[in-house]
Amino acid sequence: MQKRLEQRFYGHAVAPGIGIGPVHEATEPGLVVTHSTIATAAVPAEIARLEEALSRSRHQLGKLKARLASLPEHSQAELEPLIDAYLHMLRPSRLIHGIKTRIETGLANAEAAVFDEAEAQAGAILALTGSDRAGRQRRADEVREIARRILRNLTHQPFRNFRGLAPGSILAAQELRPSDAALIQPSQFAGIITAEGGTESHTAVMLRALGLPAVLGAHGVLEAARPGTPAIIDGDAGEIILNPSQASLDAARSKIADITRSRRLLARLQRLPAETRDHVSIELQANLELPFELPLIAQSGAHGIGLLRSEFMFMNRESLPDEDTQAQIYTEIVAAMEGEPVTIRLLDWGSDKDVEALNAYLPQPPEPNPALGLRGIRLLLQHPALLETQLAAILRAGAAGPVRIMVPMVSLCAELQATHAALDRVWRRLKRRRVPMAAQQPPLGIMIETPAAALSARQLAAEAAFFSIGTNDLTMYALATDRCLPAGGNLYDPLEPAVLRLIHMTAQAAIDAQIPVAICGELAAREHITPLLLGLGIRQLSMHGAAVPRVKKAVRALNFADCVALAAAALAAPDAAAVREILGK
């Protein structure tokens, strides 16, 4: 048999790394939409079909959102708002209202109503004028994506499935949506290729989070590749080589060896202190999304858990976890950390999040703007039993090792004082019952994620044992822009000097009050921003475990005096673009 010639294709370099393996395409069954007119008497039944499809769609997206919890925080910060936007569209929204109107008034069958309304709304978005064409396209794609999900649930037509593809394959597809990418098991594939897509899409962010080499928008490769065609994918160069020569294979294997050596060098940092060249110590901790990430934290060299998100215990269940259930899970995590501190954030939830077990606690009627409504500690204080059950479970876990309690969404000193009072009540109650606990109450600190909290940092520091700055929400509230809205994409930027000044103000208040202050938001994992954060007064950083070695490497290359000078220049900058110039990015 004649050997096939080597062919090279190029696309957008989305996720770095080298992969070698056979190409296998994952196709999606075609979606068939029928159009028909229904009788007036059939309207209630058609609406019921629609509601069932909406319910199935919400359930699927809830599971998908739980899957995101295993990804790095910066990826979650990008993708979680997208899933929230999808969930919002599945509730009473302009899209759902339009679909129901087509059924009730136009007597369209549900499938036709969903398809036609989504296309009408997507077309209206694309028809808008302005310079943000990419943003309009993303928003239109979001409408069409949620419509596709509703339609497949309405018609019971299957979704894309990767389970039948051979392990070690290079996965190829015409396109991948974020919901597809979230289902990919990284250990199953050597890389990802698509014929469509770009570097700024939600799918690109997801693929970077998976840690697989990925090249999107590689035109022609699907037509040229037969099932099982040997290939090399270079996620750094955006190159795909079909039927690679021996020389190309040798070069690719050499690159893989170089990447492995680089990762080993980072692993060696685990035993070294996070200390600047002029001997300023920085504490690096890890964020924990789900318990199965504990081994990654142990390997990362992180000293403790700076943010344990407790929401995972409430997800995908019909009833609330009781005190014993919560206490057992917390205790297992605290014990696994072997004396390193664990900071547990109280349930951070509100009407902006779809958690079945908590739906009965949501305000009625639904809030018009959940981001500004009853979230975090505001809602917990309205439901003392919910708050005190969680506090009791955390206090019991304190018998296994050091814990700290972090209060989310604080804006007022009164909220922290009320939480202190609740903690005191639970502490006394457990003492009377002689329940094993630590000798002293755990430190009670707060998230700084609203401008009000940052502006009141000096007053809050008198009540709080520590601060942890959540830069994701702080940026959103300070700049009055929601990152899940494409129109606000250019406004949301945590490097805007207004946000940096709030961080600096908070850090100075904590330093003056002699309490710890950390960053636990997306910025903590960006090693090129580390010198800026140190210069602003931050001495603790909490991030996804995979980012700890990179940030430690950055810390060890810095002089603290240079960081202070850099931060001063950034604080005086006119905008985020100028800050990036100062950072050299």
Image (cartoon, grey):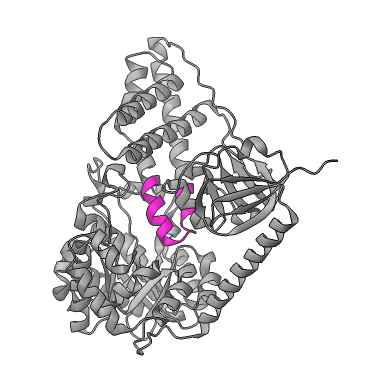
Answer yes or no: is residue 47 visible: no
State which region is magenta.
Answer: 64-82
Is residue 368 or residue 174 the one in the foreground?
Answer: 174
Q: Is residue 501 above or below residue 129?
A: below
Would you identify the image quadrant in which residue 411 lies?
bottom left
Left or right of 127, for residue 546: right
Q: Is residue 440 above or below residue 205?
A: below
Left or right of 573, for residue 97: right
Which residue appears at 76% of the width and 42% of the height? 4
Left or right of 36, for residue 260: right
- State the image coordinates of residue 199 (x, y, percent, origin top left): 44, 48
- State the image coordinates of residue 114 (x, y, percent, origin top left): 41, 25
Magenta-span inclusion, residue 485: no
Q: Is residue 253 above or below residue 281?
A: above
- State the image coordinates of residue 505 (x, y, percent, origin top left): 18, 72
Image quarter hosting the C terminus: bottom left
* View extreme (bottom): residue: 279
Could you tell me how many numbered marks the image carries?
0
Q: Kindly report the secondary structure that dominates the magenta region of the rendered protein.
A: helix
Image quarter hosting the N terminus: top right
Left or right of 402, for residue 251: right
Answer yes or no: is residue 89 visible: yes
Would you identify the image quadrant in which residue 504 lies?
bottom left
- State the image coordinates of residue 155 (x, y, percent, origin top left): 53, 26
Which residue appears at 65% of the width and 49% of the height? 241
Which residue appears at 23% of the width and 76% of the height? 507
Which residue appears at 47% of the width and 36% of the height? 56
* View extreme (right): residue: 1
